[in-house]
Amino acid sequence: MTAAPNRVRAPAKLTLSLRITGVRADGYHLLEAEMVTLELADTLTFADGDGLTVGGPFAAGVPADDSNLVRRALRLVDRRAAVHVHKAIPAGGGLGGGSADAAAVLRWAGVDDVGVASALGADVPFCLVGGRARVRGVGDQVEPLPLIDRSFTLVTPPVAVSTPAVYRAWDELGGPTGGRNDLEPAALVVAPELARWRDRIRDAAGEPPTLAGSGATWFVDGAHPDLGVALAGASVVVTRTDRP
């Protein structure tokens, strides 16, 4: 039996477009989205033992207890390991960092079933498949699409955005649609300061940004490394699409 690799990449996901197509009786929202994985990635290192540690530039505030998706994924597949997560993906930015880490655990354990992944969260099935895909349902329907080679500039401001609160606001607003992301108007209601960052990015980049999922990350197409100076206080990352 081949030993499982002791180091696994966990690429971030970027939601290029998002439509809310309905709401189930249980309150879960149905979506249709185009997602891509990025070269920006966390790294998980596995060793014998048990436990979880988190380090790296975006480790602050990331729990290492049983609420972490890494530990939940290990329990789901009935595996034990001492795991260290190097966090390069900004936490809470809508880039699927926790979901990417959970998907990395599944890959390490040899699990490629999106049904299993969906038990951990709506973004985990796509993060398990990777590449570029059309994602439907509650994230459990992943249709691979031809790969693309594109670059993006990600701007994650120091703003906390609650995903459940954004979906509730979308409902309360009457289900707004339009643009590349149906959740953007709701996110601006939940976190009004996002509008100030949107305008700063637009002025600095010369084009309007798009909100990644429920936020708080904004993105623009292409490489804009100079935005790091213009947008002091935010995390600015230039990255490309990744191949699974």
Image (spheres, rainbow, N blue to C red):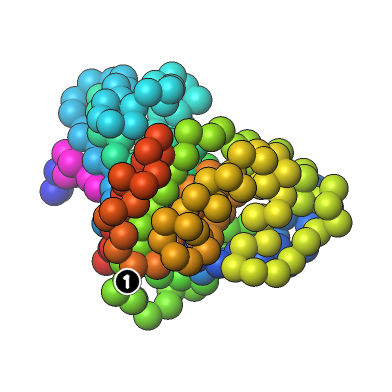
Front residue of 164/226: it is 226
Specify start and end residues of the magenta stretch as a single range.
5-12
Residue 63 appears anywhere in the view: yes
Q: Is residue 139 positioned above or below 80 on the image?
A: below
Mark 1 secondary-structure assignment: loop
Residue 175 colored in magenta in the image: no
Q: Report the amino acid beneath label 1.
A: Arg
Q: Position of residue 199 (x, y in %)?
A: 55, 53
- Residue on which the image places disc 1: 150
Q: Position of residue 80 (x, y in %)?
A: 31, 28
Which quadrant of the figure has residue 8?
A: top left
Q: Which secondary structure class fits the magenta region best?
A: strand
> Alpha-carbon neighbours of circle 1 within 10 Å: few (<14), some, or many (≥20)?
some
| Residue at image location 70% in from the left, 54% down from the top | 185
Q: Position of residue 181 (x, y in %)?
A: 62, 62
Judge from the rendering whether residue 151 lies leftward or rightward of residue 75; answer left or right: left
| Residue at image location 29% in from the left, 39% down from the top | 88
Q: Residue furthest bottom?
A: 146
Question: From the image, which quarter does the C terminus lie in?
Answer: bottom left
Q: Position of residue 97 (x, y in %)?
A: 41, 42
| Residue at image location 58% in from the left, 58% down from the top | 139
Judge from the rendering whether residue 43 lies leftward or rightward of residue 74; answer left or right: left
Which quadrant of the figure has residue 56?
A: top left
Q: Is residue 173 positioned above or below 193 on the image?
A: below
Callout count: 1
Residue 75 appears anywhere in the view: no
| Residue at image location 41% in from the left, 61% down from the top | 205
Judge from the rendering whether residue 32 lies leftward or rightward of residue 127; answer left or right: right
Front residue of 134/195: it is 195
